[in-house]
Image: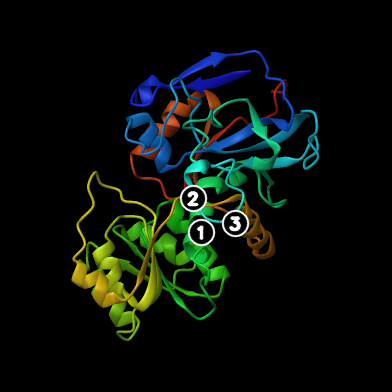
Amino acid sequence: MRSYHVDSGAGIDGLAIREHEDPVPGPGQVLVEIRAAALSYRDLMVLRGDYVLPVRPDVVPVADGAGQVVALGPGVTTVRVGERVAGTVFPSWQDGPFGIQHLPQLGGSLDGMLTELALVDETALVRVPEHLSFEEAATLPCAAVTAWNALTGDGHGLRPGQTLLTLGSGGVSLFALQFGKALGARVIATTGSKAKAERLAELGADEVIDYKATPDWAGRVRELTRNHGVDRVVDVAGVLEESLKAVRVAGHVACVGFVSETAPPIDPLVLFGSGATVRALAVGNRAQFLAMNRLIEEKRIRPVIDRMFLFDDAPDAFRHYASGSAFGKVVVTRGAPLGQS
């Protein structure tokens, strides 16, 4: 089998393929042939050396992957050989709130999915929706689960008839748009690209704001909601003060991260005046993954894929993703199973 390896901070050029003996699953472990892996922003951070969580030396990178079960260790009862599965980013986080005990994560302190074969604990696997390809299923563990958590993980959840604001057109925002529409919400999206605005509308956005043409996009959101504000914001950019201006009184802002090295400070008066809940979150637990998959199956949702690269071309996939030009997920695919051409 072959795997990519990298040291945190080595960059894209530090990615290297190495050959290994095929691993043998131990008690409670499952051997999965990884058929596709998807890139997320946290994977770029690992390569750059600025990921906030621990990264082991010489790690197999990438948290997101999907494949087929090829062998079971002693005592495994929850999956069968031949089943199509994906791994959870935080393998021990089964349900409930996140805690320090769940810090080990794929592609960071644990080996990830940019490999031909992966050993995964059976409790860290979920079956993937039947209508999705391996490439589509590989996009779910990080971005999709994060979006689902942002919409539903506060104990109340986005409800039919409410209004959702998504920022930009990254993976989390696109999934939030798709899930928001599936949950019956009105969705307002922002982007700085006319071409991407058209794509967002095609995906179902009810209103799209070009933040380059309309710098006061929060004010435009207020106009579109009759000065009421949106019920929920999925903020992936770290512009929390603007998000607080766009959200209704006692609304909800899901803080997913920020895209620059430093995020703008928040005026406490704006935070207090909004009366809103600001919830920082990172991905989600296995129970949320399972609930999300039920909606994906029910509504026949298909992830948006920008481009696929072959396994041997994974560094080019990272370069394309890092360019910021992608609309949808960038996927590394292995195509045929091992031993087949």
**Which badge, 2 or 1, is on the more N-terminal residue?**
1
Task: Identify whether 115 is placed above or below 178.
Answer: above
Q: Real-space Cα distance between discs 3 and 2?
A: 10 Å
Q: Which residue is depicted at the point 25% across and 77% down?
A: 273
Judging by the rendered image, the residue that carries numbered circle 2 is 283
Side (left or right) of 55 relative to 112: left
Residue 329: x and y in percent read 48, 46
Residue type at mark 3 is Gln
Q: On residue 288, which mark appears?
A: 3
**Which badge, 3 or 2, is on the more N-terminal residue?**
2
Residue 63: x and y in percent read 52, 37
Circle 1 Cα neighbour tier, 10 Å, few/some/many (<14 / 14–19 / ≥20): many
Asked whether 266 or 328 is in front, the reply is 266
Side (left or right) of 298 relative to 217: right
Q: Secondary structure at mark 3?
A: helix
Disc 2 to disc 1: CB gap under 8 Å: yes
